[in-house]
Image: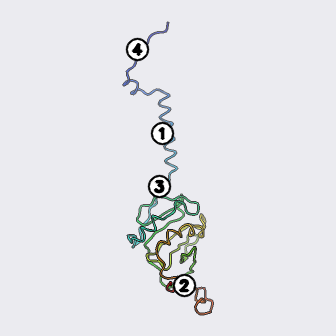
Amino acid sequence: MPARTRPRSAATILARPTRSRAAGILALTLVAAGLLSGCAGTVALDPADDATNPSCADVIVRLPDTVADLAKRETDAQATGAWGDPASVLLRCGVQPYGPTTLPCDNVNGVDWIRDDSDAPTYRFTTFGRVPAVEVVLDSEAVSSSSTLVDLANAVSSIPQTNQCLDLDDGTGTSTGTPVPIPAD
């Protein structure tokens, strides 16, 4: 007949983990650490000077969950957005609007964007004819600018357009390729 063992109390059982329970705790810890390490952290951005403009709030609540197939990330500044891990698309609302400029202007889904490629492959697009202006900075080696701007057009369109870009040849009949602001109708 087997020897009789004295029953252990609940306190004794909890105080001394068994090998299988210790292995289970270790496995859960490793799984949790793996999941947490795959999570993207908060993207640090500086808010634009006019980030508190109520129109920026209208833009931010309309931002899509994905841009150019990149998932939205948390940011630490008002009136900002970010997508991708690492962040390949950054948005700030409330930047200084452009006046007349020699930089190219692209119309994407009814939104005029001033394109600054001086830091290529990082491109900076700033809305034209909308106050406050919205700035989008993207890594063109990671995302397409056209896909990005199309995905953001609905949110940005919540700010009314007051001016639009036209080439000089649209008004003078000579081709210059320089965008010139004109009041929107």
- What amino acid is labelled 4 in the image? Arg
Q: Is residue 19 above or below residue 70?
A: above
- What amino acid is labelled 1 in the image? Thr
Q: What's the distance in space between the residues labelled 1 and 2, CA to CA? A: 57 Å
Image quadrant in which you'd find residue 175? bottom right
Q: Which mark is residue 29?
A: 1
Pointer 3 or 2: first along the chain: 3
Q: Is residue 102 left or right of residue 132?
A: right
Q: Secondary structure at mark 1?
A: helix
Q: What's the distance in space between the residues labelled 4 and 3, CA to CA? A: 51 Å
Q: Are marks 1 and 3 in contact (CB under 8 Å)?
A: no
Q: Secondary structure at mark 3?
A: loop
Pointer 4 or 2: first along the chain: 4
* Residue that carries the numbered disc 2 in the rendered image: 102
Disc 4: CA contacts within 10 A as few (<14), some (14-19) or many (>=20): few
Pointer 4 or 3: first along the chain: 4
* Residue that carries the numbered disc 4 in the rendered image: 6
Pointer 1 or 2: first along the chain: 1
- What amino acid is labelled 2 in the image? Thr
Q: What's the distance in space between the residues labelled 4 and 2, CA to CA? A: 89 Å
Q: What's the distance in space between the residues labelled 3 and 2, CA to CA? A: 38 Å
Please state the horizontal and vertical placement of residue 106, each as a whole percent of the image.
58, 77
Residue that appears at 45% across and 64% down = 61
Please state the horizontal and vertical placement of residue 161, each as a whole percent of the image.
49, 78
